[in-house]
Every structure is written in C-alpha cells, then in structure tokens.
Image: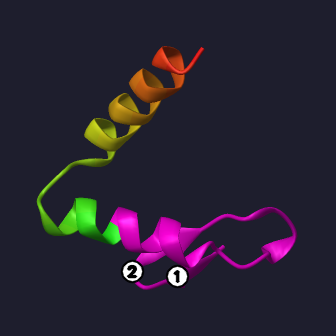
Amino acid sequence: MKWVNGIMSMCKDDKQLDAEWVHLILKAKEIGLTIDEVKTFLKTVKTEAK
C-alpha cells in the first residue's frame, strides 16, 4: 500500500492509479462526500447500467 495524493493505493502488483480516477475521488473528498456515499453512488450507477 502507498499514498497517492492523500489516497491509499492498494493496487494489485503496485500499478499506477488512473489520474482521472484520483482526480474524481479528490473532488468528492473536497465537496465533503464520505467514502460510504461514494461507494453507494458507484453501486447505484453499476446497477442502473445493467
């Protein structure tokens, strides 16, 4: 594990994080979203995409 822009990376084989993904997560943090809110949103979007 390592920290990238304040986000803990647990990438398999220590691969780099996607810069756009990091940017989106940092924006979510900036506007005050919790990890649980982000997870809920992602689950909802995934469910609706089926």
Residue 14 among magenta residues = yes
Magenta stretch bounds: 1-25
State the residue position of label 2: 6
* Amino acid type, label 1: Trp
How far is mark 2 from mark 1, CA to CA? Answer: 6 Å
Q: Residues within 10 Å of mark 2 (few under 14, many from 20)?
A: few
- 4 vs 27: above or below: below
Q: How crowded is mark 1: few (under 14 residues within 10 Å), some or many (20 or more)?
A: few
Residue 3 badge: 1
Give the quarter of the figure containing the N terminus. bottom right
Q: What residue lies at 87% left-to-right and 70% top-to-bottom?
A: 13
Dots 2, 1 in contact, CB < 8 A: yes
Q: Where is residue 14 shown, x and y percent of the image?
A: 79, 75
Hey, which residue is sitting farthest left in the picture? 31
Q: What residue type is labelled 2?
A: Gly
Q: Residue at x 34, y 33 (%)?
A: 41
Q: In this view, does 40 lie to the left or right of 47?
A: left
Quarter placement of the C terminus? top right
**What's the residue at 26%, 38% (across, down)?**
37
Q: Which residue is drawn at 39% across and 80% down?
A: 6
**Closer to us: 2 or 19:** 19
